[in-house]
Amino acid sequence: QKEVEQNSGPLSVPEGAIASLNCTYSDRGSQSFFWYRQYSGKSPELIMSIYSNGDKEDGRFTAQLNKASQYVSLLIRDSQPSDSATYLCAVRLAGSYQLTFGKGTKLSVIP
Amino acid sequence: EAQVTQNPRYLITVTGKKLTVTCSQNMNHEYMSWYRQDPGLGLRQIYYSMNVEVTDKGDVPEGYKVSRKEKRNFPLILESPSPNQTSLYFCASSLRGQAKYNEQFFGPGTRLTVL
């Protein structure tokens, strides 16, 4: 059974701090990893993708992948109130058509 | 503008009255998918399509039908809606379904209420 686990939160951080969001997955055949941001009542928006072990940086966002430990994380530096949203982790198995989503972590950035 | 569109955006209906939610993408994507999102349950896949005339069940297909007669369109059909199908529905598409570097893009969502 494919499982993607996230802490539901809410995770509260002060403005300007680093927010750290974590995700673990159960299937070692997982190949592609994505982070989506979802504002309340809106559609998920892709913010990061990562495919290899290590770090991938894009602006204030850094995705980290550790396949040996089966976790993927998202760091948000200099957090802003506009970053307040639910962050969804999604994982695809090699050769699969399906994305499996975690239930999301709700982030609240306090001004 | 590259996008996935859904219609209607909001729908209130009654039990048993057949309805169709349309989904269209203008990016020439092969892969399209339908999800439902419910509080506490997250995003769950209903059906997906790898290409024209090729569809398969996701994790929660009961009570839904789909068809893919054209590459750009992937309608979701509820032949006899029930209150437990009240949910927020998202259509998504990607260039290739299986490709490692494939990223999925979502439509704006359809909020369905079945009374």
Image (spheres, coloured by chain):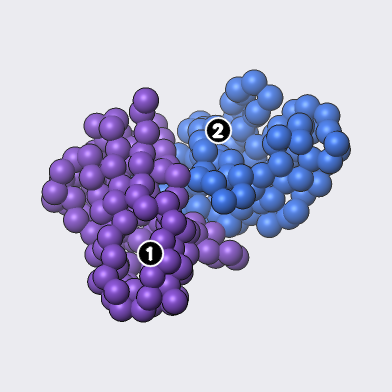
From what the image shows, is residue B90 above or below residue B20?
A: above
Q: Residue at the spot x=26%, y=70% of the render?
A: B18
Residue that numbered label 1 is attached to: B59
Q: Tell me the colour chain B is drawn in.
A: purple
Q: Quadrant of the N terminus of chain B?
A: top left
Q: Position of residue B95 (x, y in %)?
A: 30, 34
Outermost residue to the top:
A59
**Label 1 Cα crowd, 10 Å radius (few <14 / some 14-19 / many 20+):** few
Residue A107: image tag: none
> As drawn, is B54 to the left or to the right of B87?
left
> As drawn, is A81 to the left or to the right of A63?
right
The answer to whether residue A16 is seen in the rendering is yes
Give the amino acid type for the residue marked by disc 2 in the picture: Ile
Q: Position of residue A99 (x, y in %)?
A: 42, 49
Q: Position of residue B8 (x, y in %)?
A: 37, 53
Q: Quadrant of the C terminus of chain B?
A: bottom left
User: In this orientation, which residue lies closer to the viewer: A68 or B55?
Assistant: B55
Rendered image quadrant of residue A35: top right
Residue that numbered label 2 is attached to: A47
> As drawn, is B61 to the left or to the right of B66?
right
Rendered image quadrant of residue B16: bottom left
Q: Residue at the spot x=58%, y=64% of the render?
A: B39
Q: Marks 2 and 1: same chain?
A: no
What is the distance, in whole Å, between disc 2 and disc 1 at their CAs?
25 Å
Q: Residue at the spot x=84%, y=41% of the render?
A: A110
The answer to whether residue B104 is seen in the rendering is no
User: In this orientation, which residue lies closer to the viewer: A40 or B50?
Assistant: A40
From what the image shows, is residue B112 above or below residue A87?
A: below
